[in-house]
Image (cartoon, rainbow, N blue to C red):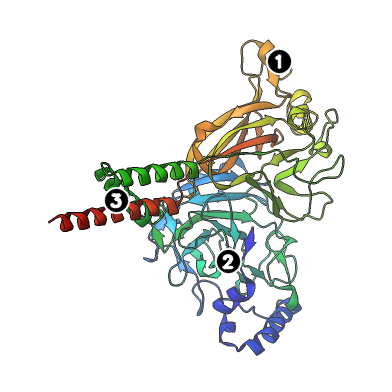
Amino acid sequence: MHIASPLRSIRRRTFLHRLQPARLSATLGLIGSLAVAGAAHAGPFAPAAGKPGSTAIGKDSPSFVQWASGHQDYLPGPNVDAAWKTPEKALGKAQGTSTDIVVLGDAGRITLTFGGSIFNGAGADFAVFENSFNDTFLELAWVEVSSNGVDFFRFANYSFTPAAVGGFGSIDPTNIEGLAGKYRQGFGTPFDLDSLAGTPGLDVNNVRFVRLIDIVGRGGEFDSYPAAYGGPHAIYDPYPTTGSGGFDLDAVGVIHFSASAMPVPEPGTWALAGIGLLALAALRRRRAVRVSAAVLATAMASSAGAATVVSTFDDLSLAPNSHFFPEASTSFTSGAARFNHDFADYGIPGCCWSGWTHSNRVDTTTPGFENQYSAYAGGGAGGSAHYALAYLGAPAVRLEAPSVIDSVDVTNTTYTALSMLQGDSFAKRFGGDSGNDADFLKLTFVGLDLGGSETGRVDFFLADYRSADNRLDHVVRDWTRVDLRALGTVAALRFEMSSSDVGAFGMNTPAYFAIDNLSVTAVPEVGSGWMAMAGLLGLSGCLGLRRQRRSAR
């Protein structure tokens, strides 16, 4: 995950953009010290909705031309009653009420789609609406955007609230910048994609996904204010809250919107190749041209060869009986695939990660959370040492180039398997006391193209007790190969898990799985140089034939 340059964002959004560079550093340090010194000082950022200088945008503003039309990866955190877990309420126009919302819960998240793309226009490009009932009870969330649905990039954000405020406390909106929830219900907090311009992996003119992540406002999360000027600052908002804890999302409105499809490669090379090949066909009786065409066809065919690369994870280094846990958000690569590793520091040793890690642990007998890094198969597939583990969150696999994923080996983690077989303090034993409960744990592979749209889905049951014949009930232990070719050509994978055992806070079954031997075959692609050569060869042949005809006259 990338965070936008804090200096660029601050200079654009506040009076600081008028300062000379020599004065900017001193002013940043002064702002930080004033904000932390006490609540008596108004903050440096825009004030509440309706006040001079506010950047709030009302829900009825004609600036909005589109609203979120779809959602995915709604993962509510704790402290959310079932009545508030309807993500469809975040779709469409903002209502500006206290009830037409979806609640994220503590550290929960949701990703929204728009039936097209947000692009970087003049000023704000979209706005996020929360349901605060006044100007100071402000529940906050980070905002991240993505072009492909896999790689997300966070807006720079600043919080100068000096101390914890309690469950019904107040915060001054002039101390908040770059966080959703700055304004009361009916007014959107604006976000400008220009602050992320130039970020590798993000096309600011083709943003198709907006992700919101609740901030647990007890001071364990930090803003992106630079350390050189006294940052980062702890982020505070009303905490704890219950029933509808965390960020309450009303809507996301879009100001700069394009309904067009993803841009496609420039057609000039294809056109030149097509003209050339047609010309070659017309000239097929000429021996020299036939020879050239044959040579060209052979070269083009050879350039289209497809290679298969397998992510075995044995190319990653680990000490014996250990796992990857860098205590930072990062990624790792094996074979032709990149795997995200997300980290949030809650001040608890070993906590908390989501996404992917890799491991060589072999414990198949110890139940519970402390054994979350072991595959139930007792090692990697085929007797290898290493394998990868996923935990929801939002695990994703990003490929080097659009390819076909042939297959992957899958098994349970020991933690999840023993939870299903024995039950634990959070989850039931599958089958229940009678052995007849129709329980299941399903893993869904979702293919994504370059634009982040789905290409297909493949389901795999990590446990299945749905048969009327209890002898067929099973929890997957051995590595099992799953054919993924039905997903077609993909740029990325995301994953969903569902279980028969659910409670007020979602799935009770531990949301882990393990993979190995991810087999990826590149899609054959004819090099543009050969295509251009085809065009030039054909055109030159036509010109030569024309000269011959003239000389024959």
Q: Residue at x 49, y 65 (%)?
A: 187
Name the residue tied to disc 2: 182
Q: Nearer the viewer, mark 3 or mark 1?
A: 3
Which residue is farthest right? Answer: 320
> What is the three-letter code of the residue carrying label 2?
Lys
Q: Which of 457 and 242 is in front in this view?
A: 457
Q: Which of marks 1 and 2 is in front?
A: 1
First in sequence, mark 1 or 2: give its number: 2
Name the residue tied to disc 3: 275
> What is the three-letter code of the residue carrying label 1?
Gly
Q: Which residue is drawn at 47% across and 45% down?
A: 525
Residue 282 screen position, x and y as percent: 24, 44
Residue 258 vs 471, above or below: the answer is: below
Label 2 crowd (10 A; few <14 / some 14-19 / many >=20): many
Left or right: residue 110 versus residue 384 is: left
Q: Nearer the viewer, residue 448 or 82?
A: 448
Residue 415 screen position, x and y as percent: 78, 33
Question: Mark number for residue 88?
Answer: none
First in sequence, mark 3 or 1: give its number: 3
Q: Which of 101 and 153 is in front in this view?
A: 153
Q: Nearer the viewer, residue 353 or 357?
A: 357
Q: Nearer the viewer, mark 3 or mark 2?
A: 3
Residue 264 screen position, x and y as percent: 40, 53
Label 1 crowd (10 A; few <14 / some 14-19 / many >=20): few
Which residue is farthest front? Answer: 552
Q: Helix, strand or loop at disc 2?
A: loop
The CA span between labels 3 and 1 is 68 Å
